[in-house]
Amino acid sequence: MRFLIVFYSLTGNSRKVAQALSKVLRCEIVEIKESSSRKSIFGFLRSGYEAITKKIVPIEDIDKDFSKYDHVIVVSPIWAGNLPSPVRSFLKRYLVFIKNISFIFTLASEKEVDVINVFEKDFGKKSLYCMSISKKKIQSQEFEKAVNEFAQKIKIE
């Protein structure tokens, strides 16, 4: 089975999880990139606003033929209980080419967020698997066990 990991990371937490999963699955990894910076108080506020309003923003093109992959795993933070605008923009542009999709969400808190229902409602497609990992677990390296379990689930599929 051919896997591809696509991630977006502002603080580095999602990047860390995506890289760990890429090692376990021995697969390619690509980053969702945008041209504008969010590393300021204004960027923080704009990020929350864009997530709440489900805004589509410009992102850089990703030079991949997504139809060649059996399964795409998106690793993303959650902003204001929603998908970040760059991730939403990625899905809007490329989801039509993706056969199977799963998610790993990185959370600032321990509280679970039901973003997968937002994805399914907004995009009309079901995800195969979804998992969330807290910032606390990522910083303490506890997330590696969860990443391994996630990888085993999607390999069995």
Image (tube, helix red, strand yellow):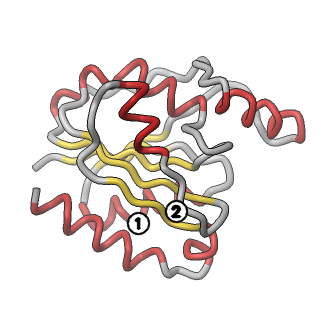
Left or right of 149, for residue 55: right
Amino acid type at mark 2 = Lys
Which residue is pictured at 35% across the width and 22% down the height? 94
Q: Residue furthest right?
A: 41
- Marks counted in the figure total 2
Mark 1, Cα crowd under 10 Å, few <14 / some 14-19 / many 20+, is some
The Cα atoms of the two marked residues, 1 and 2, are separated by: 6 Å
Which residue is pictured at 42% across the width and 54% down the height? 104
Q: Name the residue under label 1.
A: 20
The answer to whether the residue labelled 1 contacts the one labelled 2, judged by CB atoms less than 8 Å apart, is yes
Q: Residue 108 at x, y = what percent?
A: 66, 61
Mark 2, Cα crowd under 10 Å, few <14 / some 14-19 / many 20+, is some
Please tell me whether residue 7 is drawn above or below residue 55 in the rendered image: below
Q: Residue 120 at x, y = what percent?
A: 36, 34
Which numbered marker is on residue 16? 2
Which numbered marker is on residue 52? none
Which residue is pictured at 89% across the width and 41% down the height? 41
Q: Which of 145 and 60 is in front in this view?
A: 145
Left or right of 153, for residue 108: right
Amino acid type at mark 1 = Ala
Mark 1 lies on a secondary structure that is helix
Which residue is pictured at 10% across the width and 56% down the height? 157
Q: Residue 54 at x, y = what percent?
A: 60, 24
